[in-house]
Amino acid sequence: MDNLITGTMRNIAHLQGHPRFTFIHHNIVHYISVDGAINAVLHFASPASPIDYLKLPIQTLKVGALGTHNALGLARGKGAKFILASTSEVYGDPLEHPQREEYVGNVDFIGPRGVYDEAKRYAEALTMAYHRSHNLDSRIVRIFNTYGPRMRLDDGRVVPNFIGQALRGEALTIYGDGTQTRSFQYIDDLVEGVVRLLESDYHQPVNIGTTEEMNILEFAQIINELTGNKGGIIFQGERIKGDPQTRQPDITRARTILNWEPKVPLRAGVQRTIEYFRNVI
């Protein structure tokens, strides 16, 4: 179920016609109705790229509030499990490093990034309220930077930005001085973590991400190396006020409760992603 506000039917073309797959074009800000039994509701709806949520601030807030309410109502009505896709952005520009699930964050809730940060923080609060008040069988996954095939080249996130520029032979654009850090996990590892959480009986938030942290300058150099790009690197001013300077999850909870940790090495995952973009650029 998707309204395709940031998505495309190309990403699910390979599933069309499969007997166990159905696509419903719908905006979950509006009432959700689904016929028949439902085992689980996975609520991943939201613009997630800074370019998208800065362009769609009200839609981002509405899907975090009204969309989450409707998705929770569907799960409750069907007696289904519920899992909320939250984000490392609930920690804001963290004063704790690495970030544990107990950390309550350092968030500028009226700044430009606040529309996404606060939408997800509210969605977590609402999910826990349904769990406590209605005994809803809920889960919350806090997703850290994830990359892989089928991302949009123009979605504004650093991986497609860098790969797109590199494959065009352009200089890679770093916003700020490049010392800000991120921890990049490959999509397959994220999916494995989400499935394990869904199959668990754990109801508190769980970080899913890699502890392999690096600064953006180092990451740009890896992209240029793997693509053979000779365009180099250029630096521009900070793109968005409040851009987090560090990002690394503490995944003790995922390791202990889910017996999960990331498996795909950065260079292997980036190489797979580069090959995907070679065919679409």
Image (cartoon, rainbow, N blue to C red):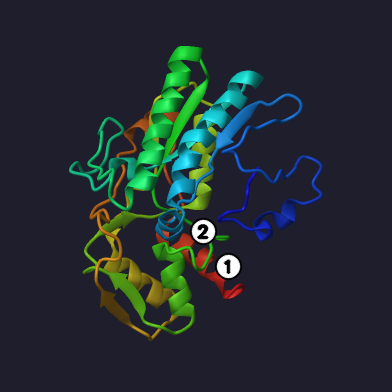
Q: Are marks 1 and 2 in contact (CB under 8 Å)?
A: yes
Task: Find residue 251 and report its image quarter.
Answer: top left
Instruction: Give SS at disc 2.
Output: loop
Query: Please, what is the three-letter code of the amino acid marked with disc 2?
Result: Gly
* Front residue of 242 and 147: 242
Residue under label 1, please give it: 276
Q: Is residue 181 above or below residue 250?
A: below
Query: Please, what is the three-letter code of the amino acid marked with disc 1?
Result: Tyr
What numbered label is drawn on residue 148? 2
> Could you tell me which residue is drawn at 77 percent across and 40 percent down?
20
Q: Residues within 10 Å of mark 2 (few under 14, many from 20)?
A: many
Q: Does label 1 or label 2 sit earlier along the sequence?
A: 2
Distance, label 1 to label 2, CA atoms, is 8 Å
Return the x and y of residue 179 as percentages of the image width and height: 21, 64
Q: Is residue 188 above or below residue 250?
A: below
Return the x and y of residue 143 as percentages of the image width and height: 42, 43
* Front residue of 271 and 103: 103
Task: Find residue 203 and report its image quarter.
Answer: top left
Residue lying furthest left: 95
What numbered label is drawn on residue 76? none
